[in-house]
Amino acid sequence: MKKTIWLTSLIRSEETVKKLISQLKTYGLEVKGHFWEEGLEKMTWMNVREELIKPDVGLWLILATGESFLAPAVRYGLSLLNIAVQAQRGLSFPLVILLSQGAPLSPDALPTPLRGADFLSLTDPGMAAKLVAKAHARVKDTSSGYRLDLYGNPQIGQWFEVGPRNSSWPGAMFGVAGGEIVFHAVGPKGSLPSHSVLNYPMKGLKLSMGEKEYVAWAVKNDLGPGDSYFIKVKGFPESIVFSPYSTGKEAEVYMVKIN
């Protein structure tokens, strides 16, 4: 199968993008893509998901400057898009940030979903060859003990989906730092449920992780690998936490920094 690169350009320069596409085509790489649109309320980032999860796409390439990642709206939208892509393509799906200027950011300075990105310079003489190698490299099957996905459009709002991958949870908890949880449901994984019965639903739980305060909701429905907990969130949380439901003082909690 011929590999395709999906290009997301945060730089609004058609000349720069056309030059890059032409350069990559000489190395046998087909490039498709778009200019990034800022529109968190409209969830415009979700439009790209269907393109990125196509089997022939071997790499996601983001053309940017170092300063691009200082904008909260950009960080948030890219984070959510990569969560949705990783849910289908795996945590090791290749992501490369191609900088036209500026220095690479440290992983700690990036949101959690973007921390696995490789950085390249647009002026690197070996840039195209490195992208060819990256696009055709065998992707390691890296997974976690949980599933994380999301859905969104202006009609239904922004929904997160969490659940166990290969185990069972005695319920689930989900919290946000920033934003507001407004609804929750339980159902089969992979799509929002049309109806839901919740066991011992809880709202307004408070918890702290590091210096952040989270407000969480929870349920005690048993969740297997085919079941999920769905949470509708209004606004744009800086980070989220989720875990199996636990009544103990200590529990394994997953934290994902989105912004």
Image (tube, rainbow, N blue to C red):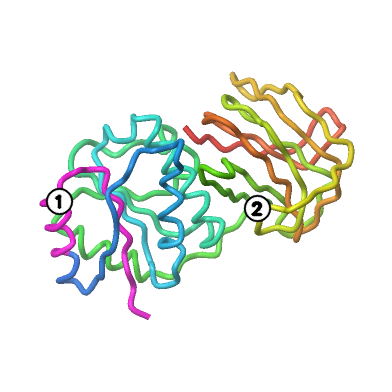
- Above or below for 88 versus 238: below
- Above or below for 223 versus 249: below
Q: Which residue is outermost to the bottom?
A: 1
Magenta span of residues: 1-23
Numbered mark located on residue 35 in the image: none
Q: How many C-alpha atoms fall within 10 Å of the one at disc 1: few (<14), some, or many (≥20)?
A: few
Q: Is residue 31 magenta?
A: no
Quarter-wise, where is residue 183 in the image? top right
Q: How many C-alpha atoms fall within 10 Å of the one at disc 2: few (<14), some, or many (≥20)?
A: some
| Residue found at x 76% / y 24% | 205
> Percent position (x, y) of residue 242?
69, 38
> Percent position (x, y) of residue 20?
16, 58
> Please, what secondary structure does the residue beneath circle 2 have?
strand
> Percent position (x, y) of residue 139?
46, 66
| Residue found at x 71% / y 50% | 163
Numbered mark located on residue 14 in the image: 1
> Percent position (x, y) of residue 190?
65, 59
Quarter-wise, where is residue 125 in the image? bottom left
| Residue found at x 36% / y 57% | 60
Q: Is residue 18 magenta?
A: yes
Quarter-wise, where is residue 217 in the image? top right
Report the amino acid beneath label 1: Glu
Left or right for 82, reference 196: left
Numbered mark located on residue 147 in the image: 2
> Please, what secondary structure does the residue beneath circle 1 have?
helix
Mark 2 or 1: in front is 1
Q: Nearer the viewer, residue 254 or 229?
A: 229
Left or right for 215, reference 5: right
Tags 2 and 1 in contact by the CB under 8 Å rule?
no
Report the amino acid beneath label 2: Arg
Left or right for 45, reference 89: left
- Above or below for 256 versus 56: above
